[in-house]
Amino acid sequence: MPDPAILRYGGVPGYVYLWLLTVIAFFLFGTRVLSYVRVLVRARPEPRWDHVGQRIGLVITNVLGQRRLLDEPLIGLAHLIIFWSFVVYATTFFWSLIRGLIPTFAIQYPDEVPSVALLVQTLGILGVIALVVAAVRRYFFAPVSLERSRDATVILILIALVLLSSLAGSGFRALAAGEQSWHTPGGACAVLFASLGGNHVRAPMLYLGTWWLHMITVLGFLAYLPYSKHLHLLASPFGVFFASLNPGKLPAASEGAARLEEFTWRELFNGLACAECGRCDRACPNFLSGYSFSPKQLIHQVKEFVRAQSDSSASNSKRLLGDVLRPEDIWACTTCASCMERCPVFNEHIPLVIEMRRKLVCEGEVQPRLQEVFTNLTRYGNSFGQPPRARAKWAEGLNSKLKDSRKESAEYLWFVGDYASFDPRVQPVSRSFAHLLAHAGVDAGILYEGEQNSGTDVRRAGEEGLFEVLMQKNQASLAKAHAQKIVTTDPHSYHALKQEYRLCNGRNIASILHHTELLDDLIRTGKLSISKKLDLTATYHDPCYLGRYNGIYDPPRRVLSALGVKLLEMPRNRDKAYCCGAGGGRIWMEDPPGIKERPAENRLREAALLPGVKIIVVSCPKDLVMFQDALKTSGLQGKLSVKDIAELAEEAVAA
């Protein structure tokens, strides 16, 4: 076969044209990438170089293995094939490019190496099939938030051209060598071309044409990539490598962010890594309910913001918050982390939201109802505005009085939480759990008026200073507590105590348990005896701050099994569980007008569709409140009831 780089075209060797095209493509590519780097350098620093081995592991499983995409088997497999086709074709392209730029280099072209040629041809065939699957899905069966944009069409066409031009070249090479055969993809292409009238005489010239088409397409693709939505092909591996190793961790304390210099480089990098696949929107409870918030649009606007800054020769004073994103969009987020759990490139939506909420709080742009809660927390240490001495009134009349852990020694300190202490809908659950502790002979105490709101939702509502005050007051009480273990019925308090509090070294608590973990342990060790199995069918709702944030999925299910409950799982369960809509301070905020259906109503309808299910079991006070309210507005009262797992356990024990 003739060497495309040595042949002369108009009297000029092919490698001269190849050099010219390469310089132009790399110049356009490098100029654009460098403009993005300059923008990121202007942002706040954020160290992400720790635990390199763990980060490499993330890249292996989530970039090379595409783990998060494979939960949708068909399109996930198609994307995996397209990805590996892209990797192999990019490798062989640069191999061909070096060989073409330096004709005296004593190496073969990749399609001249049989094993390499077979790999490329096989992946080419599979890649074309996968592209067809992806195109059919996008243009005929597109899920929510997967757009049919012109840019997406251009990228699909370019990838198809890259694969098809290479496959055609393999076919013409085989035809020229008289190697028509169904045993290899290249030979099969040669058979096809021969059936269409091709012959070995014209095959070499056709091979030259497809070789140049392939090289020009790839170089054009390279130049276009940093300007397109598929910039994520370059940026996403870095996004995964620099992902948070503790996704529930919030940004370091700051006064918030609105302008470029106030965000960290990693927060801005989210936009460059985004694949715009819409998986975050399809998991977001508020987006699906019709709120103005869209996690995909949040990251897209960050991308456009970075692009606008990179296109400007001078520093741009435009604000991301206010000029691009509206405050109501930022307040809509429940911080449930569904978007981050589903994102295949590990974008971090919640830190962006928190940074902008902090800025809104600093600037006084807070809903009146939320501001009232902040005031209550500042004055009384609870969100209900009740006097501190009323915190333990729910415990009056218990057969076994709970100790005051500040004064008496107890095995467990029960951190009760605001809703479990003050909300009359949740107080019966608190009493049920107290009865269970007494029945099992567990030595437990509470902090009485020494307990404050844990501050988890306060922090996620952007009031970092108030969170610090609440944490310090609770730490002071915890330091006085005569207990080595903490238990709580509130997943939000559980997360704060376990993940965010810096317990005093002198009084470090040995273990922090959610009540489902403790009940599971008491039942398994025989300390809590079940008098009668419950003959009922139920479903279980995984709280966001117990499940996605802390990975507690099995203990509550084991408890339900031990109680004799037949458990039917909702389609969205465990790490894919749908949020009730309470988190991130949303339980303290008014719903905007025009929403289709509140998240809690949607979740109840999902539960009601399960055959024979009459009870949705919860293990979070906020879930109980949200679902009981939603029963009234969804028309499901009398068809479905909401029970905390402690109430069911007490029923089985008391029987």
Image (cartoon, rainbow, N blue to C red):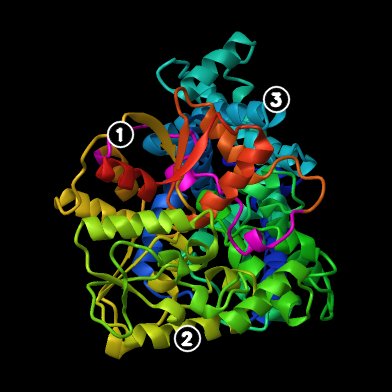
> Which secondary structure, mark 1?
loop
Q: Earlier in the sequence, mark 2 or mark 1?
A: 2
Q: Mark 2 or 1, which is nearer the eye?
A: 1
Residue type, numbered disc 1: Leu
Q: Marks 2 and 1: CB-CB under 8 Å?
A: no
For disc 2, the marked residue is 473
611 vs 103, left or right, is left
Residue type, numbered disc 2: Lys
Q: Marks 3 and 1: CB-CB under 8 Å?
A: no
> Which secondary structure, mark 2?
helix
64 vs 225, left or right, is left
Where residue 317 appears, x then y in whole percent? 84, 79
Above or below, 344 relative to 586: above
Residue at 51% across, 27% down:
125
In the depicted view, which residue is nearer to us: 651 or 377?
651
Q: Is residue 567 magenta?
A: yes
406 vs 214, left or right, is left
> Which secondary structure, mark 3?
helix
* Span highlighted in magenta in the image: 562-591
Task: Give the Cα separation between the discs numbered 2 and 1.
Answer: 42 Å
Q: Marks 3 and 2: CB-CB under 8 Å?
A: no
Mark number displayed over residue 140: 3
For disc 1, the marked residue is 534
Where residue 347 appears, x then y in whole percent? 57, 59
Where residue 413 appears, x then y in whole percent? 31, 73
Q: Mark 3 or 2, which is nearer the eye?
A: 2
